[in-house]
Amino acid sequence: MSFETLLFVAAGGIVLGGLYALMATGLAVVWTTLGIFNFAHGAFIAAGAYIAWQISSTEAFGLGYFAGAAVSVAAMFVIGVITYALLVRPFERQPNLVLLSVITTLAGATILESLLDILWGARSKQIARVVEGDVSLAGVTISANEAVLLALVVVILIGLGLFLRRAPAGRAMRAVAQNREAAQLMGLDVPKLYAIAFGLSAALAGLAGLFIGSIRFMTPTMGTDPLLKALIVVIFGGVARFTSPIFAAFIVGLIEAFATFYVGLYWAPAVLFAIMIAVLIVKPEGLFGKYEKTV
Amino acid sequence: MSEPLLRVEGLAGGYDPVQIFQDISLAMPANASIGLFGPNGHGKSTFLRTLSGLIDPWRGDIYFAGERLNLAGERGSRRFRNFNYDAVRRRRMNPKQVARAGLIHVPQGNLLFPEMTVEETLSVAPAAAAGRGNAKAQLDQVHRLFPRVHERRFHKIRFLSGGERQMVAIGVGLMAAPKLLILDEPTLGLSPKLRHELCAAIQKIRDAGVPLLLVDQDVEFLQSLIDTLYLFDHGRISRKIEKAEMPSHEEIMAMLFGAPAGGIDNGVGR
């Protein structure tokens, strides 16, 4: 096989990795801050895509791509906060919060997906691309749409990283994640910061949905597969640092692209899971993981 | 007499269903400092955690700077025993409100935020000051008091020694512009040299006019800083001692453990 094919497959893997990075970071924000796993993240992805479609598509309101993106992000932030208030907040002080929240967020995911089905129907939709055409770089051609998305993902992740390191609210979120009681004694508003973390995570899911919606077709259950991949990424990479799920996302994206190319589409998830299990046997806390969880 | 800074009336609490302390009443006049002294495991820390709202008081009231910090009434633990307490009943205290009122609690063995740098930690702390203080001046004060904290400002808390961590913890308390600073065993587990340094720093904080509520096992250290000493025993305050009549370390040990020295009878040692 030629070097060009290799580059082509790698480019596909990197685009995929960018999307996984966006989703996994969203999951990791909630995982590290609240210590729970949000199974509604996949439904958030679908909801974000449908809201963006409703605003941007010429078949609906037709206000353009960026209006769709803005409304989708804002709406998803609100949906995230509501989800937190209804599904997590009431159980926050229960000793078995982790188990309870698995069930409640799964329930939330099912309800949200049914809601999308009722509102928009099961017929596949697609969000228009940001730009048409292809771009070529060093002999590799990918669609301009995917290049723009990848650039946006990088900008968003850098912005998120700066928010967590520099902004007072971001620092407060990290503080709550690392020691809830000390943060309470410092007068931080813990429920508010948890709500912000959930909203932020849902907004990232909304963006991921928007991007996926312009690459693949949208259905109410479109989030299930990306959620699974994001879960693999988070477990595979660990959450010791903000950047570890991001690196892991690109690794998973590349593995998936090459596995699809060499062993076929249907075997790609199996290969991915096999590699993940192999890594976990050697290093249970994930590739870049330390045992403690932090942002 | 003017309104006391802190007034606790008939406070009882614990970790449901185990009651840890009961019927605690104490008053702290403005500009005075008090000390709590008692054996380990008799509920001092639980009492302090209740004061700062981390756990809900079962009965009783806490007034701070003229305001009541808890909701009126009693905790209905019996009626709601089988329900999700937080969903069914409103919690009686909110730690955020307590901290923003200026009641700042530096807990025992404070672990702070392992993955954040000293500087980042201190930058989060003024949240509790709620516009009362001046963050810049407070940071200068902390750095003057603990030069070591300034030296280590770009290091993660995880990499600090126990003494340095305690200095940062007290620094975090000072960043909140406290009206009352609660220090729970600040010198626990430190070497004699570090302990001495930390005691000097706490003396300076006191001299700067910050009222203290101090818990420590060393009566001599407490004596130099406080006006009233409360003996804490089996979840109750067994004795209140004014500064003038402060007994020596041996006498207090005798009171608590019933040793024969002096033959003091105080009705403790059940």
Image (cartoon, coloured by chain):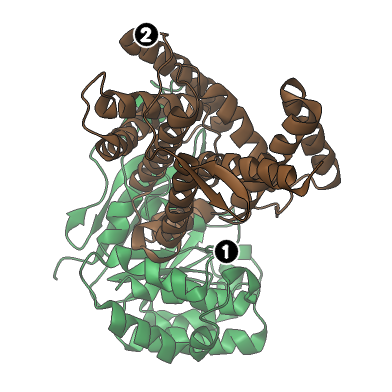
Chain colours: A brown, B green
Is residue A117 rendered to the left or right of residue A253? left
Instruction: Report in which chain the residue with disc 1 lies.
Output: B
Q: Does the image show residue B212? A: no
Looking at the rendered image, the quarter that the N terminus of chain A falls into is top right
**Dividing the picture into quarters, in which one does residue B185 lie?**
bottom right
Give the residue at x 52% y 64%.
B112
Residue flagged by tag 1: what amino acid is it?
Glu
Using the image as rendered, state which of residue A77 and residue A191 is in the foreground. A77
Foreground disc of the pair 1, 2: 2
Labelled disc at residue A169: none
Circle 2 packing at 10 Å, graded few (<14), some (14-19), many (20+), is few
Q: Which residue is mark 1?
A: B115
- Measured as percent of width and height from the top left, residue A242 is found at 56, 55
- In the displayed structure, B115 sits above or below A133; it is below
Q: Is residue A271 visible?
A: yes
Amino acid carrying mark 2 in the image:
Gly
Outermost residue toward the left in this view: B2
**Horizontal and vertical percent for residue A244?**
63, 53
> Taking A98 as reference, is A127 left or right?
left
Spatial CA distance of label 1 from label 2 is 46 Å
Q: Is residue B67 above or below residue A265?
A: below
Q: What residue sits 34% from the left and 33% below the top?
A: A76
Q: Position of residue A280 (x, y in %)?
A: 80, 41
**Nearer the observer, B49 or A167:** A167
